[in-house]
Image: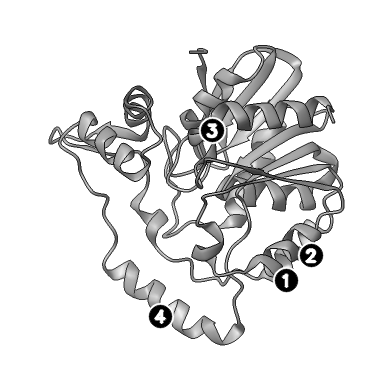
Amino acid sequence: MRSSESQFHDIRGLRYHVRHWRGDPARRLVLLHGWMDVSASFQFMVDALAPDWDVYGPDWRGYGLTDWGPADCYWFPDYVADLDALLDRIQPDAPLDLVGHSLGGNVAALYAGVRPARIAKLVNLEGVGMSATRPEQAPRRYARWLDELRERPRLRPYPGFAALADRLQGNNPRLTRERAEFLAQHWGRQAEDGSVVLRSDPAHKIVNPVLYRYEEARAIWQQVSAPVLWVDASESDTLRRIGIDADQYAQRRAAFRDLRHVTVHGAGHMLHLDQPEEVARLIEEFLRGAP
C-alpha cells in the first residue's frame, strides 16, 4: 500500500486536512471525494496508479480530519471557494489535473467552469449534478430546512470499527474485508463512550434551503475549457436517485465542449472502491494523453 502524509492548511478559517501521496511534481493530481466520504477512500485507486503521480486529496469541510463548518448546513459555494484556496496552496502558478467523485465531481465541474485557466484536465466520476428544481419549490424547501434545524440529525454509533466494517461490506458486497477494515479506520472515530461514529458533521444531512439551479450549473459547465473524462458506472443508481432519464443525462454531458464518456462495468456509484484498477487505468491514460 502506497504511504501518504497528512498536511494541514488554514483555509477560510478552517483547519483543512490534505492527504499527500508524494511523487513527481510534474505529475501532480488532485482528488476530491464525495458526500459522507473521506480522502482515504482513494487509497486503492492511488495504489493502482504509476508511482510517479504526485497526488493530493483533501478532506472537505466537515469530513475526515478537516474542521466542521460554522454554518447550519453545507453548500456548493463553500466547497468551490475552499478548492480555490487549496489549489493556491498546492500549485498556484500553473494549471493542474483534477479528479472528483460524486460531490467532488460536481464541485470540480463547477470550479473548472468558474476558473477554467486553473484546470489542465478534468475527470468526473459519477458527478452528474443534482435534481433540477422550480422556483415554486422554494417555500416548502425553506420550511423543511427550518424543521430539520429544530431536530438536528445524529449519526449512528457502532460498537467498534469491526461493526463499521460490517456495515460497509453490507452496503457494498464488492468490498473485501481487508479494504472494509481499512476504510472503517479512516471513516470512523472513537467517541468518548467507546463507540465508533463517522468522521462527518451530521449537518451534512440537513437539506440545503437554497434550491439547486440546473440552468446556472449548465451555464458554468459550458465555460469549461479543459478536456473532460466523464466516467459513470454500469450498476450505479445515481440517475434514478436524482430523477433524470437518459436523454437528460446526455444533455448534461453535452454542456461540456470536449468530453469523452466512459462506463466502468462491474461497479456501482462508489466505482473507485469497486474497480479501482480500472478507474486508475482510465484516468492515467486520459491524463497522459493516450488514445
Res 214 → quadrant: bottom right
Residue type beneath disc 4: Ala
Tag in front: 2 or 4: 2
Disc with the residue nearer the chain's start (1 vs 4): 4
Q: Are marks 1 and 4 in contact (CB under 8 Å)?
A: no
Rendered position, 98 above or below 204: above
Q: Which residue position is annotated with label 1?
A: 215
Where residue 240 appears, as percent x and y from the top left, is: 52, 65
Instruction: Using residue 276 as the reference point, say whether residue 220 is left or right of it.
Output: right
Question: Against 121, is 36 above or below?
Answer: below
Q: Secondary structure at mark 4?
A: helix
Marks 2/1: CA–CA distance: 6 Å
Residue 266: x and y in percent read 52, 40
Residue flagged by tag 3: what amino acid is it? Gln
| Residue 11, image x, y percentages | 57, 37
Look at mark 3 in the image and give the residue it sits on: 275
Q: Is residue 85 in view from this perspective?
A: yes
Question: Residue 84: which numbered mark, if any?
Answer: none
- Image point 37% across, 44% down: which residue? 200
Classify 10 Å Cα crowding around label 3: few (below 14), some (14-19), many (20 and above): many
Question: Which comes before the other along the chain, label 3 or label 4?
Answer: 4
- Dot 4 corresponds to which residue? 143
The Cα atoms of the two marked residues, 1 and 4, are separated by: 24 Å
Gap between marks 2 and 4 measured at Cα: 29 Å
Alpha carbon separation for disc pair 3 and 4: 41 Å
Numbered marks: total: 4
Does dot 1 land on a helix, a strand or a loop? helix
Label 1 sits on what residue type? Answer: Glu
